[in-house]
Amino acid sequence: MDVAGHRPRTVVSGGPLELAVLWGGFPLLGAGAGWLLAAATGWLVRLPWVPFSGLVEWLDRLPEPQATVGTITVGVLAGLVIAGIGTAERLIVTVDAAQVRLRRSDQDRTVARADTRVVFLADKHLVLLDTDGAELVREPTDLPATQLAAAFRAHGWGWADGDPHRPAYRLWVPDLPGLPAGADALLRARERAIQRDRRDDARELRRELGRIGVVLRDEDKRQYWRLTGRAVTPGAEEPTSAERGPDGR
């Protein structure tokens, strides 16, 4: 235990087994795929519809054992690249009574428990909501729900087994009334990004919508939305600074 007498922090990650699968399993799969490719080039070269036919013909002309060694080596390298990407993408969640730390190779952020009302998993994303129902965090993860729930509950966080606001979502269609000013244009742009599989653009547009009080849920490339407590819709009167209080809400 720590000096304050509280529970020690809890770390949830894929652990050593996940790393073993990434750095052992994927290179082995790549090596196997390379060996199969070398063994099958004579058959593949006779198929008129095979992709990369020029590369297959080149491999078929190579002498042995150079062809097999070369394809196995390329397969192993491809597996190592995939393992590196997987390691960079893995999420490590560290929870204690005061805050949660979310780490990936390219980011490290902390969210205070005092700012968080509820935590849950939705569509393979770890989501933290504030008291207005706005998203503080939405992180993709494959971490087990049971481990995450146990970690947050052990430290007194409000964990829910699903999105408590799910009944409030409505299917978005263009020009739907009830949205804040500018939201419809952002949703149209995001729909185009989703259709073109431009994920970075879709994430950025989600963040922009969150700033004006719109929370999204995606389902089969369709957008469902709900409003947070801070959203200002057409016809609604925006609160004065005195009504918002000292924290701006």
Image: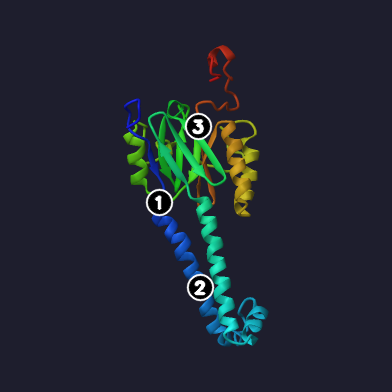
**The one of 199 and 192 positioned closer to us in this rendering:** 199
Disc 3 marks a residue whose amino acid type is: Ala
* Cα distance in 3D space between marks 1 and 2: 25 Å
Of the numbered discs in the image, which one, if any, rests on residue 31? 2
Tell me: residue 81, above or below residue 96. Answer: below
Going by the numbered disc 2, the residue's amino acid type is Ala
Q: Residue 15 carries which label?
A: 1
Residue 134, disc? 3
Labels 3 and 2 touching (C-beta < 8 A): no
Residue closest to the eye, 44 or 28: 28
Secondary structure beneath dot 3 equals: loop
Q: Which mark is residue 203?
A: none
Residue name at image x 62 percent, y 76 percent: 51
Q: In which quarter of the image is the N terminus?
A: top left
Gap between marks 3 and 2 measured at Cα: 46 Å
Callout 2 environment at 10 Å: few (<14), some (14 to 19), or many (20+)?
many
Per the model, the C-alpha gap separating discs 3 and 1 is: 31 Å
- Label 2 SS: helix
Q: Is residue 197 above or below residue 203?
A: below
Which numbered disc flags the more N-terminal residue, 3 or 1? 1
Lower position in the chain sequence, tag 1 or tag 2: 1
Q: How many labels does the image show?
A: 3
Which residue is pictured at 64% across the width and 85% down the height? Answer: 62
**Is residue 140 in view from this perspective?**
yes
Q: Is residue 226 above or below residue 104?
A: above
- Estimate the x, y position of residue 184 in percent, counting from the top left: 62, 38
SS state under label 1: helix
Q: Are marks 1 and 2 in contact (CB under 8 Å)?
A: no
**Corner quadrant of residue 175:** top right
Identify which residue, 214 or 15, lies in the foreground. 15
Q: Is residue 161 visible?
A: no
| Discs 3/2, front | 2
